[in-house]
Amino acid sequence: MENKNTKKFLDLVSNKESGWLEKAKWRQENEDWLDISFSIAVKILSALKSNKKADIFPRNQKELSEAMECSAQYINKLLKGKENLQIETICKIQRILKINLIEVPKVEIKNTIFYEVFNTLTNKIELSHWSTQNSLSYQNNEFEKANINQEHSQLQVA
């Protein structure tokens, strides 16, 4: 009886290697972006579910594929959480679903050369503006003095 069951089992088992070890190694090597891709897929599915309840376009994968102008198969692949997405694709999905999928921290520019150049230019512009304002102020004062002297002269003549 055991031989019969063993024979049935062996008949069902494939002689071809499954490649599970290679797949496991690949998942381990790509764990960082696979985790992010999975999180993005969950957020997209959640947004589609919310849209369906609120009756807002896109409500499902098919409508999302139409809005993104891509195939439904691509959306399905994306929602499995194993797609290495481009930033352009992420931005397009964010725009269509009106959600935030990833957030990149703002760069602190105080420690960069750009900041130093920006400050130098800003200071030069401010000095130039200050110089121009003072020059105009001086010219206005001289003009007013000339007008006062002219009016004073006219009063003395009269």
Image (tube, rainbow, N blue to C red):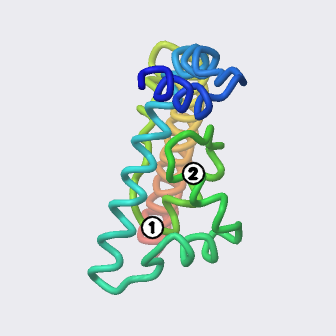
Badge 2 or badge 1: first in the primary sequence? 2
Q: Is residue 17 left or right of residue 137?
A: right
Quarter of the image for residue 114 reads top right
Q: Is residue 28 left or right of residue 121?
A: left
Give the residue at x 58% y 34%: 12
How many dots with numbers? 2
Quarter of the image for residue 135 reads top right
Q: Which mark is residue 138?
A: none
Residue neighbourhood size for the residue with mark 2, other residues' Cα within 10 Å, grouped as few (<14), some (14–19), many (≥20): some
Quarter of the image for residue 51 reads bottom left
Q: Residue furthest front?
A: 1
Mark 2 near mark 1, Cβ–Cβ under 8 Å? Answer: no
* Residue 2, position as x, y percentages in the image: 42, 21
Which element type, helix, strand or loop, lies under badge 2? helix
Q: Which mark is residue 78?
A: 2
Q: Residue furthest bottom?
A: 55
Q: Amino acid at mark 1?
A: Leu
What residue sits right under mark 1 in the picture?
A: 97
The nearer-to-camera label among 2 and 1 is 2
* Residue 43, position as x, y percentages in the image: 37, 53
User: What is the distance, in whole Å, between disc 2 and disc 1 at their CAs?
Assistant: 15 Å
Give the residue at x 51% y 34%: 126
Q: Nearer the viewer, residue 40 or 114?
A: 40
